Image: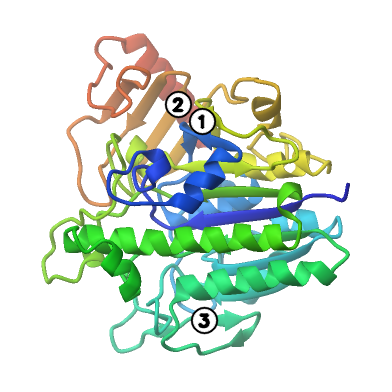
């Protein structure tokens, strides 16, 4: 059998509670639900950051974000630096072993020449380099002077204009074309389909809006955007089946961080928080190291190897994808000296537990650590701006997954030990 193809499908600001296979009571995602049934659905899967650029850095390199040179949201000005030269991406690793590689969608890991997708292992690239764009004009406004927004749509190094075309559909169409072209290729492929949905600005075609006309406007927009992605996933899977590649393709689906509560999501003239996305039972949103900001829906499928219908409660993280893919493909797995992630193949095929004794996070003034059922958050926020009263917050996630009860005074020794561990870990990043 030839080496497996690899597809990573990544959303942007998708909440844990925003898929029907993760308990949404409003959004219907039949294609993602079907994909989850074909492999493993994770209930304790984590992003390595509560914001986009660092999460993507960890996903593609297998390293904690700070080690890649990307520990914060990168700006949109052309020429912005990004991934370090030694931050080797999954695309680079697979390309060394004969893979065709493509990225369609959001990059957000640097727009300087040496940090663009084509310089980091992708043979083919169509998408945008900054953090978010208008879905129809493909113009980037966030953080830019109002008189000087930046158009941000590229085909490799060439700027292209596709005015009026919905970007979610463009990403899907490019992905399907790439898969169809694999019929004539004698190489396996790696496809990174990086949807910007459901990140603001909130735009959706009318046919999806009509599907959710019974919902409040903010929730309607979110649901419509997610359904467009779900249809895209359906088209990608259908293309794989048409070319006879589905059984021999590794597919990973997830999102970079939890749902955004930023008021700019819904252009209603107020500065109230946005209520369209759902983190389910979890506390916190994008920008928070509480579970709502970092616990993500995640699905991993490889029909030839991974048994269908699995629900995995063991802990995993985005940095595990690089070693897991390399392991499943029968290629050299990077060592613990090279990366921070671990292969979860034994978890998927042998019933093993998580390879992680601890997982740590840092973002701005926040630190967090998870060890088994315990989770400690230091300086935790609910999003970018909203604070909460506990500088030290200890939770038992087995009985309180929503982190509503602070146990630091009931279990002071555990809180002190975990605080020491996460601060020691943080010191190694500086």
The image's mark for residue 242 is none
The answer to whether any part of residue 259 appears in the image is: yes
Indicate left or right for 83 with 78 as reference: right
Q: Give whichever of discs 2 and 1 has the lower sequence position.
A: 1
Q: Position of residue 56 (x, y in %)?
A: 54, 54
In the image, 66: left or right of 211? right
Relative height, residue 46 to residue 191 (above, below) = above
Place residue 243 in its image quadrant. bottom right
Q: Toward the viewer: 195 or 213? A: 213
Identity of the residue drawn at 32% across and 43% down = 24
Q: Nearer the viewer, residue 38 or 353?
A: 38
Mark 1 nearby-residue class (10 Å; few <14, some 14–19, many ≥20): many
Mark 2 touching mark 1, by CB under 8 A?
Answer: yes
C-alpha gap between disc 2 and disc 1: 5 Å
In this orientation, which residue lies closer to the viewer: 238 or 395?
238
Query: Sequence order check: which comes first, mark 1 or mark 3?
Result: 3
Q: CA distance from mark 1 to mark 3?
A: 36 Å
> In the rendered view, does 125 fall on the left or right side of 334?
left
Q: Earlier in the sequence, mark 3 or mark 2?
A: 3
Instruction: From the image, tell me which residue sits under label 1.
Output: 359
Image quadrant in which you'd find residue 132: bottom left
**Residue position for label 2:** 370
Label 1: element kind: strand
Of the residues tagged 1 and 3, which is closer to the observer?
A: 3
Q: Residue at x 86, y 55 (%)?
A: 97
- Say few, some or many: other residues with alpha carbon within 10 Å of mark 3 (under 14 / 14 to 19 / 20 or more): many
Q: Find residue 93 and report its horizontal and vertical position in percent.
A: 77, 54
Q: How many marks?
A: 3
- Residue 197 in sight: no
Residue 48 in the image, given as x and y percentages of width and height: 50, 43
Q: Secondary structure at mark 3?
A: loop
């Amino acid at each position: 059998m030839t080496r497996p193809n690899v597809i990573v499908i990544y959303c942007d600001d998708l909440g844990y509670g925003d898929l029907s296979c993760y308990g949404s009571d409003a959004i219907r995602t039949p294609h993602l639900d079907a994909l989850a049934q074909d492999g493993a659905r994770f209930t304790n899967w984590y992003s390595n950051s509560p914001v986009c650029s660092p999460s993507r850095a960890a996903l593609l390199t297998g390293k904690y974000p700070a080690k890649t040179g990307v520990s914060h949201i990168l700006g949109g000005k052309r020429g912005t630096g990004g991934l370090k030269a030694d931050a080797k991406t999954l695309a680079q690793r697979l390309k060394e072993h004969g893979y065709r590689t493509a990225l369609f969608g959001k990059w957000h890991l640097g727009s300087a020449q040496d940090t663009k997708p084509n310089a980091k292992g992708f043979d083919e690239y169509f998408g945008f380099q900054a953090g978010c764009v208008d879905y129809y004009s493909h113009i980037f406004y966030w953080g830019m002077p109002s008189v000087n927004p930046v158009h941000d749509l590229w085909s490799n190094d060439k700027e292209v204009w596709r005015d009026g075309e919905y970007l979610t559909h463009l990403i899907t169409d490019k992905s399907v074309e790439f898969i169809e072209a694999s019929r004539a290729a004698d190489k396996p492929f790696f496809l990174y389909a990086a949807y910007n949905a459901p990140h603001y600005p909130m735009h959706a075609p009318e046919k999806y809006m009509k599907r959710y006309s019974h919902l409040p406007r903010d929730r309607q927009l979110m649901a419509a955007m997610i359904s467009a992605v779900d249809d895209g996933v359906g088209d990608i899977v259908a293309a794989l089946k048409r070319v006879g590649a589905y059984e021999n393709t590794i597919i990973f689906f997830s999102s970079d961080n939890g749902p955004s509560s930023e008021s700019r999501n819904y252009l209603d003239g107020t500065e109230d928080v946005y209520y369209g996305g759902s983190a389910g039972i979890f506390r916190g949103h994008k920008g928070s190291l509480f579970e709502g900001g970092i616990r993500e829906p995640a699905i991993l499928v490889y029909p030839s190897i991974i048994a269908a219908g699995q629900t995995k409660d063991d802990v995993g993280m985005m940095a595990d994808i690089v070693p897991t893919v390399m392991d499943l493909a029968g290629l050299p797995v990077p060592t613990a000296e090279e990366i921070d992630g671990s292969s979860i193949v034994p978890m998927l095929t042998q019933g093993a537990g998580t390879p992680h004794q601890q997982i740590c996070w840092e973002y701005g003034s926040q630190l967090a650590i998870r060890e088994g059922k315990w989770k400690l958050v230091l300086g935790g926020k609910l999003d970018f701006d909203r604070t909460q009263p506990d500088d030290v917050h200890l939770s038992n996630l087995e009985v309180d997954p929503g982190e509503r009860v602070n146990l630091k005074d009931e279990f002071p020794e555990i809180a002190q030990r975990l605080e020491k561990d996460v601060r020691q870990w943080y010191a190694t990043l500086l």
